Image (cartoon, rainbow, N blue to C red):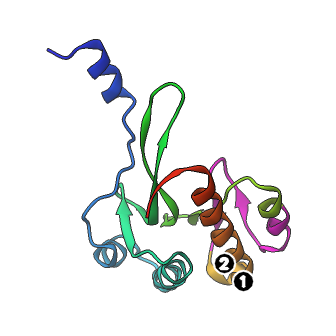
Amino acid sequence: MLSLIQFYSMAKANKTNETEVSVTEFINSYVDNEQKKADSFQLIKLMSEWSGFSPKMWGPTIIGFGSYHYKYASGHEGDNLIIGFSPRKAEFSLYVYSPTEENNSLLNDLGKFKMGKACIYIKKLSDINIEILEKLCKSTIANSKENQENTF
């Protein structure tokens, strides 16, 4: 029988964890639009170059680069990707944003996107300024290094 602490820890476990699934196989089997597939491979190339990390699958549909360990005052802790993306059916979800003053100003020049709670949504890479995306990614990586217990 589980103790209350074990049960609570399981209930609060991070749902999105790094997996051993092949990123290339995921894209080839999940992405059914040729433009989205090409954009996915381009994002992998760019984010690998900008971050210095190899792509890894996080959960069933997120491609992440690098990871960090977090711990909240409540005691809840886990690992999360530093930057990444998901080629969702309707649009890309880009996990590249830290809410800093610099990043807020960069968004003005990013291009055509929608902002979510924790990500930026785009239809295709040609809708955005890649140089601004690079700056957002690098700023988020630097912010993560300064503020988290990282696994580099």
Amino acid at pointer 2: Glu
Q: Which residues are magenta?
A: 105-123
Find the residue positioned furthest to the left. 1
Q: Which label was assigned to residue 134? A: 2
Task: Say which of 100 and 29 sits in front.
Answer: 100
Query: Any magenta on residue 115?
Result: yes
Category of crowding for the residue at label 1, using alpha-carbon neighbours closer than 10 angstroms: few (below 14), some (14–19), many (at least 20):
few
Category of crowding for the residue at label 2, using alpha-carbon neighbours closer than 10 angstroms: few (below 14), some (14–19), many (at least 20):
some
**Considering the image in quadrants, where does the N terminus appear?**
top left
Side of 45 where 30 appears, left or right? left
Task: Say which of 4 and 23 sits in front.
Answer: 4
Residue 131 x, y percent position in the rendering: 72, 83
Amino acid at pointer 1: Glu
Would residue 88 be visible to someone looking at this image?
A: yes
Q: Which label was assigned to residue 13? A: none
Side of 127 where 69 appears, left or right? left
Q: Residue at x 24, y 64 (%)?
A: 20
Residue 120 x, y percent position in the rendering: 66, 61
Which residue position is annotated with label 1?
131
**Considering the image in quadrants, where does the C terminus appear?**
bottom left
Whether 123 is drawn above or below 114: the answer is: below
Residue 26 x, y percent position in the rendering: 32, 71
Whether 130 is drawn above or below 82: the answer is: below
Q: State the SS at label 2.
A: helix
Residue 61 x, y percent position in the rendering: 40, 60
Q: CA distance from mark 1 to mark 2?
A: 5 Å
Would residue 96 be visible to someone looking at this image?
A: no
Side of 61 where 112 appears, left or right? right
Q: Residue at x 80, y 66 (%)?
A: 107
| Labels 1 & 2 near each other (Cβ < 8 A) | yes
